[in-house]
Image (tube, rainbow, N blue to C red):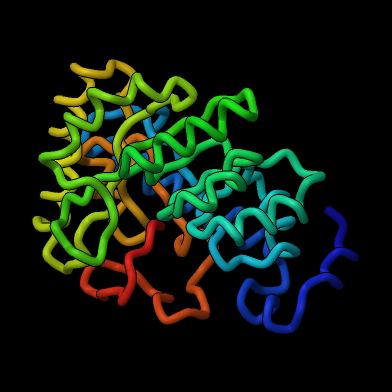
């Protein structure tokens, strides 16, 4: 990346991400990784057990090139349309795309063309359509089963009681490669309520892995609570704001206690 490429940034981009986005993102990445390491130390874990998935929701394509220059190779996106458009615009870069938001079955045909990972599997209908489309593409897809551990009606995901019956049937979809379970904790300033969601997912994983041995991973924790998630066993943390800053949207800030009007995944 050359300095002349900054001409691609709009005034709004510069106001949001600064004059040197690469340096800002690199510094933020270092800070997040240090916090991950500290959380691992507190819980007697190795930082190698935790994968950081940067979430690039609403970050414009020109700015994503600076993120790539900062060393980011895994890009997580909530909305499939946004991910699809970014993938096309950044086809010259070696990026691994993870879709982490709710997916309608009529959009599966787009996801299977480029995504490497899907974190929101929550129905047999979706599993069937994914498997059918993947078979046509002659490819496999890593998936996480989403669980609603908070009990909030605004959130997607299986109910905890439905997880084991769902897992028992995953072998019916051979193109899906289950990696683990995923959740969003409750948006609350009460750390114990947040921690309870993560503990529930860990307990469900421990039961699920006895049925499907590949389900070892826990995708849980976002910018506001990823350290708590790590203490409770997270293997993948989905971090957007702590790397890229606040977004110019109605859900621009999520930290425990600041309730977002819509469920978010990073």
Q: Name the side, left or right, on which 6 lies relative to 161.
A: right
Task: Give coordinates of residue 179: x percent, y percent.
Answer: 38, 28
Task: Give coordinates of residue 49: x percent, y percent.
Answer: 37, 28
Q: Name the side, left or right, on which 216 lies relative to 48.
A: left
Res. 29 in view: no
Q: Judge by depth and name the residue closer to the eye, 106 or 27.
A: 106
Q: In which quarter of the image is residue 212?
A: top left
Q: In which quarter of the image is residue 109?
A: top right
Numbered disc total:
0
The quarter of the rendered structure image containing the C terminus is bottom left
- Is 52 above or below relative to 86? above
- Is 170 above or below relative to 58? above
Res. 85 in view: yes
Q: Name the side, left or right, on which 240 lies relative to 19.
A: left
Residue in view at x 61 percent, y 53 percent? 26
- Is 5 above or below relative to 77? below
Q: In which quarter of the image is residue 62?
A: bottom right
Q: Judge by depth and name the residue closer to the eye, 108 or 197.
A: 108
Task: Give coordinates of residue 157: x percent, y percent.
Answer: 27, 50
User: Farthest residue toward the right?
Assistant: 4
Residue in view at x 45 percent, y 54 percent? 104
Residue in view at x 63 percent, y 23 percent? 138
Q: Judge by depth and name the residue closer to the eye, 140 or 198.
A: 140
Task: Give coordinates of residue 163: x percent, y percent.
Answer: 19, 36
């Amino acid at each position: 990346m050359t300095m002349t490429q900054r001409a691609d940034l709009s005034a709004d981009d510069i106001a949001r991400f600064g004059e040197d986005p690469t340096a800002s993102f690199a510094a933020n990445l270092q800070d997040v990784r240090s916090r991950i390491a500290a959380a691992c130390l507190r819980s007697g874990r190795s930082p190698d057990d935790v994968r950081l998935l940067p979430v690039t929701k609403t970050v414009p394509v020109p700015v994503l090139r600076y993120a790539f220059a900062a060393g980011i190779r895994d890009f997580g996106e909530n909305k499939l349309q946004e991910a699809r458009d970014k993938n096309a615009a950044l086809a010259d870069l070696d990026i691994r795309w993870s879709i982490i938001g709710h997916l309608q079955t009529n959009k599966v045909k787009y996801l299977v063309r480029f995504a490497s990972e899907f974190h929101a599997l929550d129905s047999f209908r979706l599993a069937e359509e994914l498997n059918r489309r993947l078979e046509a593409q002659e490819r496999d897809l890593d998936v996480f089963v989403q669980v609603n551990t908070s009990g909030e009606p605004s959130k997607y995901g299986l109910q905890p009681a439905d997880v084991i019956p769902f897992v028992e049937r995953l072998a019916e979809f051979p193109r899906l490669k289950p990696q683990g379970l995923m959740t969003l904790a409750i948006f609350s300033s009460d750390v114990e309520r947040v921690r309870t969601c993560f503990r529930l997912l860990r307990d469900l994983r421990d039961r699920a892995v006895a049925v499907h041995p590949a389900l070892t991973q826990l995708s849980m924790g976002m910018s506001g609570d990823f350290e708590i998630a790590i203490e409770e066993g997270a293997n993948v943390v989905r971090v957007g704001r702590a790397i890229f800053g606040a977004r110019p949207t109605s859900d621009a800030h999520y930290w425990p206690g600041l309730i977002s009007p819509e469920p978010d995944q990073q």
